[in-house]
Amino acid sequence: MKNLVFCFLFLLSVSTLASQVIEPAPDDQSVVYFMRPGSTGGIINFVFFDGDQVIGRLGGNKYFRYECSQGEHVFWAKSENRSFLEANLEAGKIYIVHARSLMGATKASVQLRAIDPGVDKLKQFQKLLAKRSGWDLSEEKIDELNDQLESYKTKGLERFEELKAKGMLIDALEPDMNLEAEDLMFVKKKKGTKGI
């Protein structure tokens, strides 16, 4: 029985370490983690876009890794509302976008927020990466969503242009808001090490 418990604990620790492997960004691509920590409004899926292309969908307490070209992008998400984020990305760098779930009139609304590792705490994102595997949609499902949301994508980008023309605040993901793969590793502090 002791051997069985030992094997279980060993496998559990190995699986925890396995989930801690964070791949660096390819030299010729930028990586953006779209993360939705917490379970508030978790059953409502947010759909994410890069310009006029669907790139993913997330429920609560999930994330996905998106590799894209460097340069300027307009990321946005839809739920009850639309939330936009302008991005200027560098190749070989990693970025985080927090998809916050907010109270909506009929369902959860979404707010995209660029995470600045120099200002924002990363613990909730590190924990999510340590606990869960990334959520990936098949190419088939992404193609299906792109077809279903064709007119919605056009209206969404028109709305972005209207907001920008009016000078309304749209969050921005800047090149210096990047981090290294090891910055995303969650390290649990031992008890009694406070103040060391």
Image (cartoon, rainbow, N blue to C red):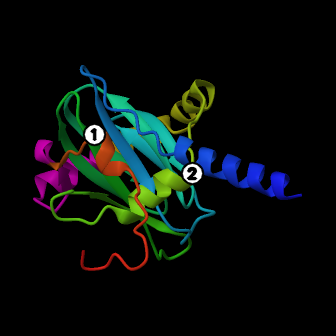
Labels 1 and 2 touching (C-beta < 8 A)? no
| Position of residue 66 measured from the top left corner of the image (x, y, whole percent) | 40, 35
Please state which of residues 112 and 186 is positioned toward the viewer in this rendering. Answer: 186
Left or right side of 171 for 80:
right
Q: Position of residue 129 (x, y in %)?
A: 47, 51
Query: Sequence-wise, which precedes: disc 1 or disc 2?
Result: 1
Q: Who is closer to the viewer here, 178 or 80?
A: 178
Q: Where, quadrant-wise, is the C terminus in this rendering?
A: bottom left
Pointer 1: residues within 10 angstroms few (<14), some, or many (20+)? many
Q: Crowding at label 2, few (<14), some or many (≥20) Cα neighbours within 10 Å?
A: some
- In which quadrant of the rendered image does the N terminus lie? bottom right
- Residue 82 in picture, x, y percent from top left: 38, 57
* Along the viewing direction, whichever of 119 and 78 lies nearer the viewer: 119
| Dot label at residue 132 | 2
Q: Secondary structure at mark 1?
A: strand
Q: Residue at x 24, y 19 (%)?
A: 28
Task: Answer whether residue 12 is visible to the viewer in this image.
Answer: yes
Q: Does residue 134 appear in the picture of this structure?
A: no
Placement of 127 over or under 87, stated as above or below: below
Residue to which mark 1 is pinned = 94
Q: Quadrant of residue 125?
A: bottom left
Q: Is residue 159 magenta?
A: yes
Q: Which residues are magenta?
A: 158-176
Estimate the spatial distance between the alpha carbons at disc 1 and disc 2, rounded to whole Å.
Answer: 18 Å
Does the magenta-highlighted stretch encompass residue 73? no
Lateral position of residue 39 relative to residue 164, left or right: right
Q: Is 184 displayed left or right of 28 in the figure?
A: right
Residue furthest right as drawn: 1
